[in-house]
């Protein structure tokens, strides 16, 4: 959520306009949202539902160097 807030702030917009987020039990996206900040779990579920990620033009992995403790 903090990353989405920072990006939206840089654009001078509220979260949910151009930049939104999806985390467990909470999301703030709208019809104009073009950038979504998501958690590893949200991305994993989305990949399971749609391996081609139709409608997604670009993925950026941030904090990728951090080890995940999620069960395999």
Image: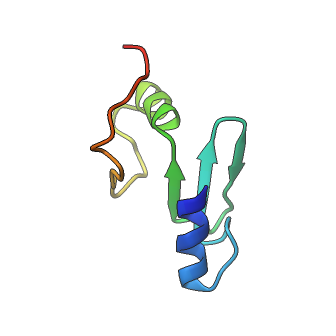
* Left or right placement of residue 64 versus residue 45 in this view: left
Up-down: is 11 above or below 4? below
Q: Residue furthest bottom?
A: 12
- The location of residue 6, given as percent across then percent down, is 56, 71
Residue in the foreground of this view, choosing between 55 and 1? 1
Q: Residue furthest left?
A: 65
- The location of residue 34, given as percent across then percent down, is 52, 65
Up-down: is 10 above or below 45? below
Type of colouring: rainbow
Question: Residue at horizontal 69%, vertical 61%?
Answer: 30
- The location of residue 24, given as percent across then percent down, is 65, 35
Question: Residue at horizontal 33%, vertical 55%?
Answer: 60
How many numbered tags mark residues here? 0
Question: Residue at horizontal 35%, vertical 57%?
Answer: 57
Residue in the foreground of this view, choosing between 69 and 39? 69
Q: Quadrant of the N terminus?
A: bottom right
Up-down: is 23 above or below 71? below
- The location of residue 44, given as percent across then percent down, is 43, 30
Up-down: is 55 above or below 3? above
Which quadrant would residue 14 be assigned to in this image?
A: bottom right
Q: Quadrant of the C terminus?
A: top left
């Amino acid at each position: 959520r903090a990353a989405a807030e920072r990006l939206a702030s840089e654009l001078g917009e509220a979260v949910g306009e151009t930049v939104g987020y999806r985390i467990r039990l909470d999301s703030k996206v709208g019809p104009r949202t073009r950038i979504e900040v998501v958690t590893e779990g949200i991305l994993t579920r989305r990949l399971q539902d749609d391996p081609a990620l139709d409608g997604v033009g670009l993925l950026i992995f941030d904090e990728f160097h951090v080890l995940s403790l999620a069960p395999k």
